Image (cartoon, helix red, strand yellow):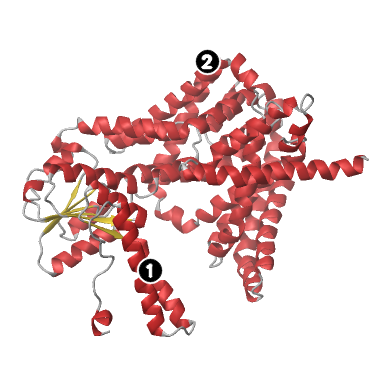
Amino acid sequence: MAGSLAPSAALSDALVILGAAGIVIPAFARFRITPIIGFILVGLAVGPYGLGSLVGQTPWLYHITISDPEAIAPFAEFGIILLLFEIGLELSFNRLWSMRRLVFGLGAMELAGGALLIGLALMSIMGESLYAALGLGLALALSSTALVLPISGTQGPVGRAALSMLLFEDIALVPIIFLLGAIAPTAAADGGAVLLDTLWRGGLVIMALLLAGRFLLPSLFAQAAQTKSPELFLAASLLVVIVAALATGAVGLSPIMGALLAGLLIAETEYHNEVEAITKPFKGLALGVFLITIGMGIDLRVVWANLGPLAAGVVGVVVIKALVTGLLLRVMGKGRGTALETGILMASPSETTLIVLATATQAQLILPATAQFWQIVTAIGLTITPALAKVGEAFAKRLEAREPASADLPREEPAGDRAVILGFGRVGRLVGEMLAMHDAPYIAIDSDPRLVREARLAGLPVLFGNVASETVIDRLDLDHARALIVTMDEPVLVSRIVKKLHKLRPELPIIVRARDADHAGELYRAGASHAVPETLESSLQLSEAVLVDLGVPMGPVIASIHEKRDELRQQIMEDGDLAIAPKLKSTTLRERTA
């Protein structure tokens, strides 16, 4: 009887998890909210403190709740391992080296400063010991890569600043876990010999993994790739992750240290894109299980009973981290709006905070009750991160609106009687080159000081400024501008700028880079003269090439491409409230000859 019930319980739990993934991810994606929040809320609802507590009175709830939270714990741990492996795949040694100054300068100061202030506050206010304050300070100083980067992006000033700090935190996660595990014996007793033993054995294992990765991984994945079997390629990827995790775990280090190291090593091979693509679904689902277990650990009755201390904990962590991050960015020369927005966005704890808290608990540096308190604080912080992003953006706009004009653009370079390019990245620079080729004067503006400096050294008319600021718009002298070209890849910001500039100069031609057909329709409604969807034409050309290579006659291919283009034009016309359908591309030589 017991044997027949166990599979039923396992299947019931699997049904809840898969059902949560199937409902949460699409529902939250529709509202552009990260699924992380959804999984935590699902865990809260189906866990032993939610609907699970009512199974005795309402038996049918058994089928939509998690009956045995401990049974899914191994899957949650595997999710953490795959998360760190995925981070390693994104953090190649080359990428780290190219960003070394920001990552190891700004990122190190932000993490150390936040951990120090939080630790001192915990020691002075809550009476925590030195080791407990160290573990809690390092855990709570971390910020969420999974939440922050999708909100901020990586191209704008806020996104680049956040990326550099998050990269360092991702790198520092392994040393933090190693440190907490290594000092655990000395926290319980004076075990210096044990600490030294852990250090040298861990060092040997890491060196062995680095050497094995350099010489064995390329041939391993080459053999797997030659079979052209996705199953074998997946098996090889998971084998590398599990072997590395077991190796570091065997000598007293955290298994996720080996997972991150495996990711870094694979990132140096030509197979990293395939590995990332084939393991990503497993990482997402396993991470969802981990987040569900976090939600299951939140008892709303405990939250209500400790509402004051929990609110104080959340506010304290957010305020300290926002101040540290914002002040450091100001010291490094970032604008006040950028510093404020980035500081508030980075202020909440991270999903990796939960990993460090679990490590500190296992190392007996903090009590389980203390860990549970800060886990609830972390879960609340993760949930309010999107709201913090909105607050930071609103405050940054107000602050930038009050900045003096001289802080953005020098007065000796007016933009009159020229085309004005907003954004001088890859697309903006190419537009500028084409304008210069035809002797059409232009002036460009960008908020990336490195791009501006390189362009100025090349003799190009590019100025530094934040186009979201009212004072920058005033200094552009749009009364004499011939056309405005908006090239940034930030859809929300671009729509806002187009709407604002169209109100100022309704007759000014505004040509805008759009992300897709929906974005193009939104830009036309905002007042754009011409919105160019960058993905549509490349997709049509790719489809044409594929069909021709498959042997489909050229005539039907061209006809179908024209039909699809007309369909997209009609869609954009309807979405943008236009009288006539817009052009998606200029007439080519082939079309004219045809």
Residue at (74, 32) in percent of width and height: 61
Q: Name the residue under label 2.
A: 124
Residue in front for this viewpoint, 19 or 151: 19
Residue at (60, 61) in percent of width and height: 278
Residue in front for this viewpoint, 563 or 323: 563
Residue at (64, 37) in percent of width and height: 292
Give coordinates of residue 417: x percent, y percent.
Answer: 6, 54
134 vs 560, left or right, is: right
Q: Quarter-wise, where is residue 584 in the image? A: bottom left
Amino acid type of the residue tagged 1 in the rendering: Lys
**Position of 346 relative to 212 (above/below):** above
In the picture, the disc for residue 564 is 1
Residue at far right of view: 1
Amino acid type of the residue tagged 2 in the rendering: Ser
Residue 516 appears anywhere in the view: no
Q: Which of marks 1 and 2 is in front?
A: 1
